[in-house]
Amino acid sequence: MSARVGIVLFPGTNCELDVTEAIGSIGGESRILWHGDADLSGVDAIVIPGGFAHGDYLRPGAIARFSPVMTAVSEFAANGGPVIGICNGFQVLTESGLLPGALQKNAGLKFRCGMARIRVASTRSALTRSATVGDVLSIPINHFEGNYTCDDRTLALLRDEDRIAFSYVDNPNGSTGDIAGISNEAGNVVGLMPHPERACNPLLGSDDGRVLLTSLVGSARAAAV
Amino acid sequence: MPFAVTVHVELRPGIADPQGATIERSLPALGFGGVEGVRVGKLLRFTVDAIDEAAARAEVDDMCARFLTNPVIEDATVIIEALP
């Protein structure tokens, strides 16, 4: 059975076509979902891509969480549907309360743009089920506010419940616990700062993102059955 | 009646402040010594119409909790003054 991935488009999102192309390159189907529509058009998984939703005004993700589509996304997530937030999408998920913690300005106030090496720390998330724990992937990062911040209690909880999906090999932004990506308790909601959709073709310097998007499409198919 | 509202948004104690740290490190280069504990926040000003000050405060507290701050990392201090 074919599964479709919905890609949420806010005003200011700028990675929706990269995600569309990357999902197509691994044989998946996708469609764009406008943020003003509260209807998810029956998709089997959701990606909230990178960019600057609503201009990042006030705080990244602070306004996006009130877009009509997010009510439907929260409901979809609560029913176990796979939801992935990449970069700005991760910020939207933390602001929405679908993932714990917050993303602050990078340590040293440096905008980080380049290839990052991240280690797969758990395979129980919808984005890592086809990967192997310990795999080191080269995935680009491109952010100013990717410094994952949470209190000690939340960090302990994330560790105890195996919810740290990825950690940086060389922490580029000051993130607590070298965290690059986390999941919710059930593993169906995942947020990460690196951009797997930009690492799906060797011509772009890495195709290490393919295993992650393959996991996502696999999760979508499982949800569709 | 109208109230003037000032909301100071600050990072909660213990939350690292990359902007404050960068400013603190830069000051000695400009010849300003002895500065410690720089914290950067934001200030919002607006007016709100409410039946009394308590109602205005309740409204602004709700705004802060749901929108103006991220309670995971930020605290708000609200100042409310009745306008003539």
Image: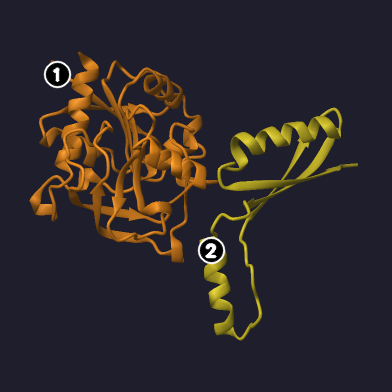
Chain colours: A orange, B yellow
Residue that sits furthest to the front in the current view: A160
Check the residue under mark 2 and report the chain it is in: B
Q: Which of A175 and B27 is in front in this view?
A: A175
Residue A199 disc label = none
Residue A2 disc label = 1
- Residue A71 location (% of width, % of height): 46, 22
Badge 2 element: helix
Q: In which quarter of the image is residue A157?
A: top left
Q: In this view, does A127 lie above or below A221?
A: below
Residue B19 disc label = 2
Q: Nearer the viewer, residue A192 or A129?
A: A129
Q: In which quarter of the image is residue A210?
A: top left
Measured in 3D between alpha carbons, the distance from the residue under mark 1 to the one under mark 2, in whole angstroms, is: 47 Å
Residue that sits furthest to the bottom in the current view: B31
Residue drawn at (76%, 32%) of the image: B58
Residue drawn at (41%, 45%) of the image: A52
- Residue A137 location (% of width, % of height): 19, 50
Q: In this view, does A183 lie above or below A144?
A: above
Residue drawn at (18%, 48%) of the image: A135
- Residues at discs 1 and 2 in contact (Cβ within 8 Å): no
Q: Quadrant of residue A94?
A: top left
Badge 1 element: loop
- Residue A28 location (% of width, % of height): 15, 28
Q: Is residue A159 above or below residue A137?
A: above
Residue drawn at (56%, 43%) of the image: B72
Q: Nearer the viewer, residue A22 or A119?
A: A119
Residue type pointed to by label 1: Ser
Check the residue under mark 1 and report the chain it is in: A
Q: In which quarter of the image is the C terminus of chain A?
A: top left
